[in-house]
Image: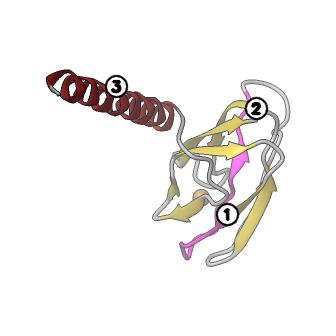
Amino acid sequence: MRHALLTALAGAALLAGCGGDDDMTAQSRTTATAAPTNTIRMTDFEFAPSRATVTAGQKIKVPNDDAAPHTLTDRPSSGRPRFDTGTLRGRQTGSFTAPRPGTYAIYCELHPFMKGELEVVQ
Ligand SMILES: [Cu+2]
């Protein structure tokens, strides 16, 4: 009788241990990589989020919430931009297609202080 109880307790502890491990794995996965988004807003002269994770090849919507015009433009260290919304008038929504995986600096050509980072994942 006593033996049966101990066996049951040991089994329960084992199951609880497994569940805990699964939760830990899921949690570290979510903190390691932000979930990809398909929208980057322009709000109060800032990109929101300022560091966005997107999926390669995905069409990313870019609503301009400001009255002022903005662009969301790739800022390569050399060469031509690989993506660019063009000028979006106030309250206009534009888009661009996420390039191949990598980290890209972005900015607004009209307000160079308006900066962000685009993390493109597969
Ligand atoms: Cu701007």
Residue 31's mark? Answer: none
The residue to which callout 2 is attached is 101
| Total tally of numbered discs in the picture | 3
Q: Name the residue located 69 percent from the left edge and 73 percent from the top edge.
A: 89
Name the image quarter holding residue 65.
Answer: bottom right
In the depicted view, which residue is nearer to us: 27 or 58?
27
Q: Amino acid at mark 3?
A: Leu
Q: Is residue 60 above or below residue 93?
A: above
Nearer-N-terminus badge (3/1): 3
Q: Which residue is mark 3?
A: 14
* Residue 56 x, y percent position in the rendering: 79, 42
> Spatial distance from mark 1 to mark 2, Cα to Cα?
19 Å
Residue at the spot of label 1? 62
Q: Quadrant of the C terminus?
A: top right
* Majority secondary structure of magenta residues: loop
Instruction: Report the span colored magenta.
Output: 62-76
Spot occupied by residue 109 in the image (x, y as percentages of width and height): 67, 50
Residues packed near mark 1 inside 10 Å, few (<14), some (14 to 19) or many (20 plus): many
Above or below, 49 relative to 121: below
1 or 2: tag closer to the N-terminus: 1
Circle 2 residues within 10 Å: few <14, some 14–19, many ≥20: some
Q: Position of residue 106 (x, y in %)?
A: 64, 42
